[in-house]
Each structure stands twice: as structure tokens, then as C-alpha cells.
Amino acid sequence: MCNAIDRLRRDRALPDGQMRALLLCEDRDVLSYLFQQARRVREEAYGRAVFIRGLVEFTNHCKNDCYYCGIRRSNAQAQRYRLQEEQILQCAQSGYRLGFRTIVLQGGEDPFFTDEKMVSIIRGIKSQHPDCAVTLSIGERPEKSYRAFFEAGADRYLLRHETADEAHYGLLHPAGMSFRHRMDCLKALKEIGFQTGCGFMVGSPYQTVDNLLSDLAFTAAFQPQMVGIGPFIPHRDTPFKDRAAGSALMTLKLLAIIRLLLPTVLLPATTALNTLLPDGCEQGMLAGANVVMPNLSPQGVRKKYMLYNNKASFGSEAAEALDSLRARMARIGYEVVCDRGDYRQPSC
Ligand code: SAH
């Protein structure tokens, strides 16, 4: 199996049979070799720097009804909120003072935030903090909206593909939602010039190893600048409330494999991983991740942005959270840096 890992590192690809065997492998020595190789590749690209992104969860209103998600339209239990533009700018400013140089605006698909409102928020952040990157994670919009956001100064866009298998997509989403449309959005984002992120949940209901192989194949072919993956975690007020959570170990394996497929990709240790494992951030870094996204949302709304239950946080105050993250990273030999943390092209 270690030969397959060497091959994956060298070729940035692996035949399906070997990739499947690696996904199914639970041999501790093999896995520690996998993680070690992923760390090496990450350190060649980014050293031991940990990039931080300040996450502002600015609305939990959503017109979609994804079966897995706690802020889905049909969840009448969700307490809905929207931040005002002024509040969003304040979050960005407090993040800036703490050393964040990327602000991520994430939310449900909320038609209240028209293109004009989004453009105004993006411009506001960029004029307050010209040295900050702005990342959007607000789902599917028409191409012309994406262009307007890019022209307003947004730098990056996260849109997880959720699953690369159309039939599986249909099991996770209601009929009105379209796999093809999501994929078209991803292509448009990349063409427009965003640093673009795709990604998927690990252990989502009905997911098979074949689905994961498709996710990896899609990810390698799409060549995103960012990849977001985390375990599926059930939410009590969704149709998937009784489903098992995804595996943290499988998530770590996939992080390492993605690092080897895409050596310079920006790869977060996600909140969902940190929710399943108390040291999820550390383990994520040690498996090849190089990004963490601490929460900058106002205290009062954090619990309301509940995609899944028991969501982890680094602490109530952003400053305290950042100190704790710095200490956690330092303990494993990594260093949180104050940097935009842009994508770097692979050397060859
Ligand atoms: N509305 C935006 C942002 C979605 S929230 C969009 O459509 O892109 C960000 C991600 O959280 C989703 O892409 C999904 O992969 C993940 N997510 C949602 N529900 C989850 C759950 N129950 N467990 C784990 N991850 C979940």
C-alpha cells in the first residue's frame, strides 16, 4: 500500500483499484505513512503556516431544502436571522484587528441579499480593508451575479459540489435542485477568475466508496484552488436525523489524498471535523490541511447557524478563539499567520 502512496504522490493520480484499497485501508502504519507524505507535500508548498479565514455567517434564511442541512427551508424550528450590512462590516473589522486577512461570507441562499446588497457589502469590506481577501459561500446564483461579485472585488468562492454522482445528488436534495446546475455554477466561477472551492461531505447518507472515487476524480479533474470536506453530522430537525455521522478517520484519509492529488490546494480542517474530534484541527493539519476558519459571527447568532448539531467552536470570543487556535497549532509545530493566504501555483 505504501507503494501506492508513493505513486499517488509522484503521479498525482492513482488507478481506481488502488485508490479504493487506500480508502478502505485501516492499517495504522500505512495511514501514518499517508499522513506523513501529505504533510511533506503541504510543507513543500506552504511550509508550516496555517492560514486563517474569518467566517461570518450572515444569514440562515435559505430557499433550498437540502435533506441534510439544519437551515433548510422546511425546518420550522430554526430561528432565522439576518445580519445588517453594518454588522457584517463590523465583524470584518474586528477580524481585521485580530489579524484576519480573509473574510468569508457564508449563508443560506437568501433572496433578501440581492446582487446589489452583496456588491455593496463586498465593496464595503474591500474599501475598509484593501489588503483583505473576500470569499463568498452563498450557493448558486446566475453567472451574471457571480461576475458582479467578482468585479466588486470578491476574490474566492466556495461552492461544494456535495457529491459528484448525479444519482447520489438526487438522494440528498429535493427534485427542484439540480446537480447539473451546481456543476455549471462551479465551472462559471472558475472561468470568471475566482479562486474556486469545491468539496463534499464524508459519510453523507447513501454515500458509497464508488461515490468517493467519483468525488476524488471530479476534484482532480476540476483543479480547484480550494477543497472543503468534512464529515456529515445529522441535525435533529432534518429528514436525515437518524442517520449515522460520517467517519472522522475517513475524512482524515481523504484530506491526505486530496493533498497528494492537488499539492498546493487550500485545504481547511473544517468545523465539522473539529466537532467529531476534540483535536480535529490538529489531526487535520497532520493529515495535510493548511487552513482553519474560525468564527467571527456575533455571539448571539452562532447557535442559530446550525447546519448540524453540537457544532464546535474555539471559544466564545473571537480573540480568545484565535489565541486558543494559535496555541493548539504551536503545540504541533505549526504557526498561525496573518496573511491573505492565496493559492500558490504548483511548481510543475
Ligand atoms: N448555502 C451555501 C453554503 C452552504 S453551508 C451553499 O449552498 O454553498 C456549507 C456546507 O455545509 C455545505 O456545502 C454542506 O456541504 C455542509 N453541510 C450542510 N449540512 C451539513 C451537515 N448536516 N453535516 C455536515 N456538513 C453539512
Image: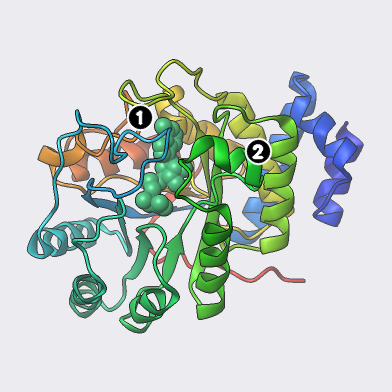
The answer to whether residue 246 shows anywhere in this view is yes
Splitting the image into 4 quarters, where does residue 87 fall?
bottom left
Describe residue 198's horizontal placement relative to residue 218 as left or right: left
The answer to whether residue 271 shows anywhere in this view is no
- Residue, x 32% and y 45% (percent of image)? 294
Q: Kindly give the residue lying farthest to the front in the view shown.
A: 175
- The amino acid marked with disc number 1 is Tyr
Work out which quarter of the rendered image holds the C terminus and state it: bottom right
Work out which quarter of the rendered image holds the N terminus and state it: top right
Q: Nearer the viewer, mark 2 or mark 1?
A: 1
- Residue, x 31% and y 23% (percent of image)? 310
- The amino acid marked with disc number 2 is Leu
Give the residue at mark 2: 254
Q: Position of residue 134 (x, y in %)?
A: 34, 68
Nearer the observer, 15 or 265 = 15
> Which SS class for mark 1?
loop
Give the residue at mark 1: 308
> Which SS class for mark 2?
helix
Ligand 1 appears in which quadrant?
top left
